[in-house]
Amino acid sequence: MTKTPRHLCSAIFCCLAEFLRVEDPIQEMVTIAFLIEMLGCNNINKELDHALEIFPTYLKSQCPEMPRLVLRGILTLSERPDMAKKSLVLLPVIMEQLEHGDMVLPVLVNMLQLLEGKESSRIALVLADNLRWLFDNESVTVRQLSIHLFRDTMGLVAGAKRKKMKEVVWDSLLPLLFHLYDEDKSVAKASQEALCSAGCFLKWRQLVQLVKTAQVWKIGECLLARKKSRAKDYLHQSQHYLQNPGGRQVPRALGMAGG
């Protein structure tokens, strides 16, 4: 396909778009799959704008595999220099697809790098507030990517949005602390990096120092000392985490669940 003359590629793309006018779930799946394979062809340009127009509809498809398929196509577009910024038009609907974590997170990583100004702060804040629900995902990849992306969002928030972002960061400290003991080393390392970034964002040097020197057992005490008003929230977070199988690895020295 990549060696096919442009006029033929364009004709094939247009035919595929016509096929999508017929409401047939099986035909739609096959057509979208074929269309997505064409997104890597360097000899089509204007046709890709049409793909941006039809993708939102199929991202909301009731067929469980369709959104994942479309996200793979959007990832391809977000990596094309000629389409990366154009693909940002899909960002609002993409952020509604976090349940497809392993597919949507790489797309969001690419798109966040393209945002600028106030829009960057707004999107980063909304995203950060939702990402922490993926920290406990069954998939190691999703846990790692969501924590890495959360760390990146802190560097994008500026101005008036920082106050709200501080609340989001405070709510995420304990989950990140627990994941320092994640059974997967890559997730534990991502949590360590995110906690250091959180300490810098909150201008809390003690947290950064404790994380860097691996004095993890002191962090729980410091959290309570720094924010006593959050004690009930910390207890609730701890109990929720310890009820999960992975939570059994967290030492009681953290002192959150045992009182």
Image (spheres, rainbow, N blue to C red):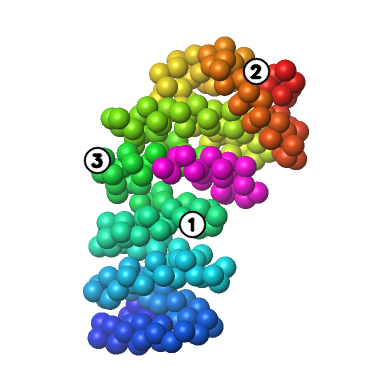
**Is 120 in front, or is 47?**
120
Q: Earlier in the sequence, mark 1 or mark 2?
A: 1
Give the labeled residue for mark 2: 217
1 versus 251 height, above or below: below
In the rendered structure, the answer to whether residue 120 lies left or right of residue 212 reads left
- Residue at the outermost top position: 225
Q: Quadrant of the N terminus?
A: bottom left
Q: CA distance from mark 2 to mark 3?
A: 39 Å
Q: Amino acid at mark 1?
A: Gln
Helix, strand or loop for the magenta stretch, by majority: helix
The answer, for residue 120, to whether it is visible in the render is yes
Q: Earlier in the sequence, mark 1 or mark 3?
A: 1
Decide: is 11 above or below 151.
below
Q: Residue at x 30, y 87 (%)?
A: 11
Q: Which range is magenta? A: 126-146
Q: Give the position of the C terminus as an image quadrant.
A: top right
Residue 121, position as x, y percentages in the image: 32, 39
Label 1 packing within 10 angstroms: few (<14), some (14-19), many (20+) = some
**Tag 3's secondary structure?**
helix
Q: Could you tell me which secondary element the residue under label 1 belongs to?
A: loop
Cα separation between marks 1 and 2: 36 Å
Contact check, label 1 and label 3, Cβ < 8 Å = no
Tell which tag, 2 or 3, sits nearer the viewer: 3
The residue labelled by disc 3 is: 117
Q: Based on the displayed image, in which of its 4 quarters is residue 35 positioned?
A: bottom left
Q: Which residue bears the numbered disc 1?
A: 97
Q: CA distance from mark 1 to mark 3?
A: 24 Å
Spot occupied by residue 65 in the image (x, y as percentages of width and height): 55, 69
Q: Secondary structure at mark 2?
A: helix
Residue found 41% across the figure and 31% down from its top: 165
